Image (tube, rainbow, N blue to C red):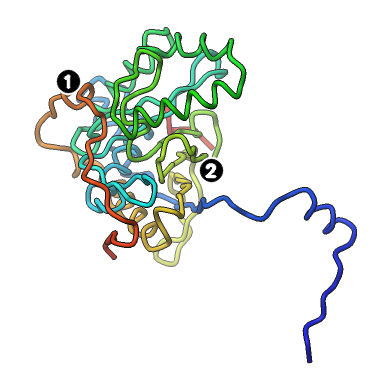
Amino acid sequence: MGARDTKLRGWRRFAVALWPAPSDPQMLGDMEIDATAMLACIEELRRTSGVHVTATHLAGRAVAHALTVEPDLNVTLHGDRLRRGDRVDIAFIVTFGAGREQAGLTLADVGRRSAVDVAQELIERAAGARENAEPGFDRAGRLADHMPLRVVRALLRVGVWASVDRGWDLRAIGIQPGGFGSAIVTSLGGMGIDHGYPLLTELGRVPIAIAIGRIADRPVAEDGHVVVRPMLTLSASLDHRYLDGSHAARLAAGIRAYLADPSSFEPAGPVDREVSSTSLPSRASTPCRPIGAATFGSGEDRSAD
């Protein structure tokens, strides 16, 4: 018996007229983390260092750890070729101007640095962004305010090409060398949000974005009993052009391993901060290779206190 077509009517017809076929390659996923070890580590690091370490800093380190142990996930797309990074840089999203403005601050070599060092640099640079002291931010904003959107869009694309593809230093106009590095981390917990998906931007060529939710006590099953644990939701947006489900599983495994015992991953000695934060380009890389030739190995907010 042959197939029979049915003509679309009513809302379905409106829907087809309103929206084109799907073209977004993003994959979305969540993981629930028992934050007990995170909170203990944060308390100890604050006590011993005097630096205001938060879950955001540990989550950034966790993502960097996952990309360090699974280096084939640390890639960017250049035409029909994948470029693998030689180190893991993480872009942290910060807000300022009473929440009306935001910026991505890329920290270099996060995979080799301590949580305290990451926290200290991010705190200092976030303060600089809020005070218009971060190089180029204020100037870039003022220029964009007086340009037509089509001009801003074109300049952004040219700037990303020059920064990411060519490694040029454009910090004078607010564009960091290397763009957004290996992954983007943003915190929703500080705004009291439990869960939400971050956006991937085509301008950054970053295949991984992680949103950190609010840490709150929740009932969980443990050995057949219901217990209360401080739980954290991490939400990920992944670019399917780079990664698929098996890669997402390996990324999640690396993040879970770090957050299960963050203290055990603290480096024994300090990394030269001057080199890691100012060397250019900010994302060293290996030569590109064709995509077909790429080989992948198989209640209370405590998130931003």
Q: Nearer the viewer, residue 93 or 21?
A: 21
Residue at image coords 52%, 9%: 142
Dot 2 or dot 1, earlier in sequence: 2
Q: Is residue 285 left or right of residue 177?
A: left
Q: Residues within 10 Å of mark 1 (few under 14, many from 20)?
A: few
Q: Is residue 301 left or right of residue 49?
A: right
Tell me where residue 259 appears, x and y as whole percent: 31, 46
* Amino acid carrying mark 1 in the image: Glu
Q: The residue tagged with tag 2: helix, strand or loop?
A: loop
Q: Residue furthest right?
A: 10
Q: Is residue 285 left or right of residue 194?
A: left
Disc marking residue 274: 1
Quote the CA–CA distance across marks 2 and 1.
33 Å
Tell me where residue 27 appears, x and y as whole percent: 50, 53
Quarter containing the C terminus: top left
Q: Nearer the viewer, residue 137 or 70?
A: 137
Residue at image coords 36%, 44%: 78
* Amino acid carrying mark 2 in the image: Tyr
Tell me where residue 223 appears, x and y as whole percent: 39, 65
Quarter containing the N terminus: bottom right
